[in-house]
Image (cartoon, grey):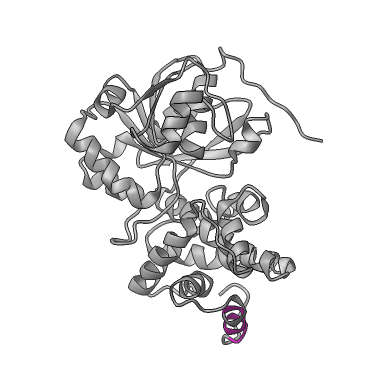
Amino acid sequence: MSLKYSIPMDYTRQKIKVTVIGCGRWGSFQAWYADQLGHKVTLYGLTGDITYEQLVMTRKNEYLTLPKSIELSDDLPRAVKNADIVMVSVPSQAFRSVMGELRGKCDMTGKYLVTCMKGIEISTGMRLSEIALEFGLEPWQIAVLAGPGHVQEFTVGNPSCMLFDGYERATVERMVEYFKSPLIRFYYGTDVIGTEIGAAAKNVMGIVAGVLDGMGLTTLKGALMARGSREVARLIKQLGGNPLSAYGLCHIGDYETTLFSQHSHNRMWGENYAKGKKYDKLAEGVHTARAMSLLADKHGVEMPITCAVNTMILDKVTPRTVMEQLFDRTLKDDFN
């Protein structure tokens, strides 16, 4: 039986001004959720973008209805000017462009920036928070939102757990205080490297899970959970993070919503790929597999599952061939 939770409008003590950049599925939810908490919310989108234009005309998308208290804006400087927190929810490969827009058009002095998406930049291998630092933000300004959650579940009152991470503990604690509710229990992240890598990597594992579903090999998902998290832990450690982060909310804690859920775009992409069908919705794991394969090669980390996904996509190798190659690898100890 599902537990249904609502959010009392007086739940958070301090009300703030939140601007969300990006009005897709996750961005529109962040705006909806912040509004439910009683914060003053502006949702920014581009004129001419079909998703934004639909919200302007109907205040609805296929997932939720935006209350009238949320301001819709296509004027970035105006949307950001009075915000206390700027939340960014765009495709990860577009994040650098957004940061360029923010630096060129807006004053981010004294404001927090929260990254809400999960990915690694292909061209540089950089984590999103590293890109934000490159564009001049101070470490205390940056927070990372990660962990399991689907809009379709949250909007009907099904609760979940997530986390905020960042370079400074005070920032993490402040974000949790601003956004905690009976609907989402937030935890304090303590490893920004592990959180960002783990969160991005789970999308790759989601593609694998979908491929297994498409091949009728769903029973292998247990092995995927064990071996996938091991290789992600190796990369996190090599990059200077805590390998245990791979077993927390940012990665393995997000597996149910990614490896098993009907709502997961990455899982659906993989399933359709295995069946020879095209899937048009955004699947961040496609790009992340490439970025993480490059990171693995650069840092000498063995990531057979991740690299197999990248090979499958880039070289058009059949899922069956990829599976046979993985099973034919040299045998080793369980915890290697």
Quarter of the image containing the N terminus? Answer: top right
In the image, 273 versus 38, the foreground residue is 273
Q: Is residue 5 left or right of residue 36?
A: right
Answer yes or no: is residue 177 visible.
no
Taking 151 as reference, is 59 above or below it? above
Answer yes or no: is residue 17 visible.
yes
In the image, 73 versus 132, the foreground residue is 73
Taking 107 as reference, is 114 above or below it? below
The percent position of residue 156, horizontal first and vertical second, equals 68, 30
The percent position of residue 125, horizontal first and vertical second, equals 33, 61
Taking 261 as reference, is 24 above or below it? above
Q: Quadrant of residue 321?
A: bottom right
Quarter of the image containing the C terminus? Answer: bottom right
Question: Residue at point 42% right, 53% down?
Answer: 119
Q: Main secondary structure of the magenta part?
A: helix
In the image, 333 versus 206, the foreground residue is 206
Give the residue furthest to the left. 104
Q: Is residue 226 left or right of residue 141?
A: right
Question: Residue at point 42% right, 60% down?
Answer: 287
Q: Is residue 327 magenta?
A: yes
Give the residue furthest to the right. 1
Q: Quadrant of residue 160?
A: top right
Q: Is residue 105 left or right of residue 46?
A: left
The percent position of residue 30, horizontal first and vertical second, equals 49, 31
The percent position of residue 103, horizontal first and vertical second, equals 20, 37
Q: Is residue 197 magenta?
A: no
Q: Quadrant of residue 241?
A: bottom left
Total tally of numbered discs in the picture: 0
Residues drawn in magenta: 322-328
Taking 222 as reference, is 311 above or below it? below
